[in-house]
Image: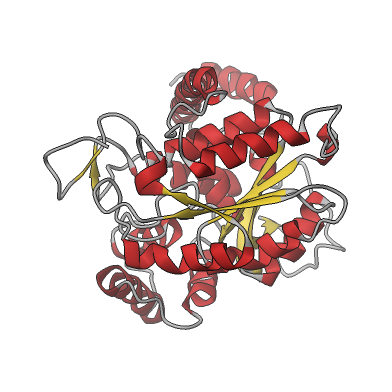
Amino acid sequence: MDKEYSGILRRKISEILGEPIDDSVDADDLMFDLGLRYLRKMAADKKKRVNRKKAHQLSLWVDEAASKQALVAYVDAVTNRKGPDYIPKKDRIAVFDLDGTLYCESDPTWFDFMLYKHRIQEDEAYRDKASDYEKQIAETVQSVIDTGVVPAGFEVEIGSCIAHAFAGMSVREFARYVRDYAERPSPGYDGMTIGEAFYQPMVQVIDYLQDHGFTVYVCSGSDRLVVRALVEGGLILASRYVIGTEELISANNQGDTPGAEYVFGSGDELVLSGKIANKNLKMTKVSMIAEQVGQCPVLSFGNSAGDISMTNYVMGNEQYRTAAFFVCCDDEARESGSPQKAQPVYDFCAKNGWVPISMKNDWLTVFGEGVTKKDRTDGQQ
């Protein structure tokens, strides 16, 4: 590319983004990346418009489903200005777990586990640099996939490993890396990519709540930066509404200088430090919701015992009427669930008065038209 033209293009891109563009970045490559980002946004916006037309009726739900009726009754009650349960818009806050609640956690395992395994075993730019310990952790991920058993403490251990495996990468590069990985074909399903594995009835719930004045947060045990990049195309909320495992971010020229002493300069770029500050599980979910949201939500959606702390926090809101819903992954035909896997969730819902959502019986679809499990040939999802 002509140097003068490249310089003009770089300046224009810098003006649009509102930040300087490093001279080492090829302007053509950057334009290509921006074009992909724009196309992704167009596709997401189109999907959002289509979903919103149907979301008010929750059209992907079985009308007679008790969970749908409970949700509609709750929303009607808390948005009725003349009713005793009315909640002002500023206090209508809902929190959702991600994996198993909004997004498939069995394709073949959690997204962040799969991303890490790809980085260590398949990424030609990194796999030769991976330490023996990192390779061992990747093998443990394969064991989780094969057996379904997660070793005690492994979720915390792999969180630190994920951070380390991407240390030094810029925040912008990392988001691009996650999105590019998410565009790979789904391992377990035909007709969708890894990043499209959102439960479409639950996506409708988010649309439905937003249409009724709710502010929605996703609260995940996965790395916040991973989840932000994942939901950008597949969900319908801005990245600032993502709460997740907190990874420390630094400036690329900061070195060992503490953040309280270092002055971010015009030539600096945000990079991943490789260190985890907080793993967002159980009680930590509660504290991080309190820190980021600043008030107690009124509505909670989860899918496992790991979401009980968050749910108890929400249900303890004494100012307003609250509700809690749990997705029970009991669909063996359209998703990799099972009645045995779902039964404990049904049990603690019954014990606590929370509302179970049957993936098998309450949803007309899981991932949308044209998506089928790869071990199944006689029907669509």
Determine the residue positioned at 24% across, 44% down. 189
- Quarter-wise, where is residue 275 in the image? bottom right
Q: How many marks?
A: 0
Residue 8 location, x and y as percent?
Answer: 60, 17
Q: Residue at x 34, y 32 (%)?
A: 368
Is 128 drawn above or below residue 48 in the view shown?
A: below
Residue 6, relative to residue 317: is it above or below? Answer: above
* Res 267 visible: no
The quadrant in which residue 91 appears is top right
| Left/right of residue 190 with respect to residue 307 in the rendered view | left
- From the top left corner, tell me how far across and down residue 151 is, in percent: 42, 81
Residue 112's place in the image compared with 184, above or below, is below
Residue 124 place in picture, x, y as percent: 30, 57
Q: Is residue 358 left or right of residue 237?
A: left
Residue farthest toward the left in the current orientation of the protein: 377
Residue drawn at x 24%, y 48% is: 333
Task: Between residue 55 and residue 257, name the one nearer to us.
Answer: 55
Q: Nearer the viewer, residue 136 or 153?
A: 153
Residue 378 is left or right of residue 280, and the answer is left
The colour scheme is secondary structure
Residue 229: x and y in percent read 53, 43
Q: Nearer the viewer, residue 13 or 244?
A: 244
Q: Quadrant of the N terminus?
A: top left
| Nearest the eye: 346 or 284 | 346
Q: Is residue 168 above or below residue 279?
A: above
Q: Is residue 316 visible?
A: yes
Q: Quadrant of the C terminus?
A: top left
Q: Residue at x 83, y 59 (%)?
A: 262
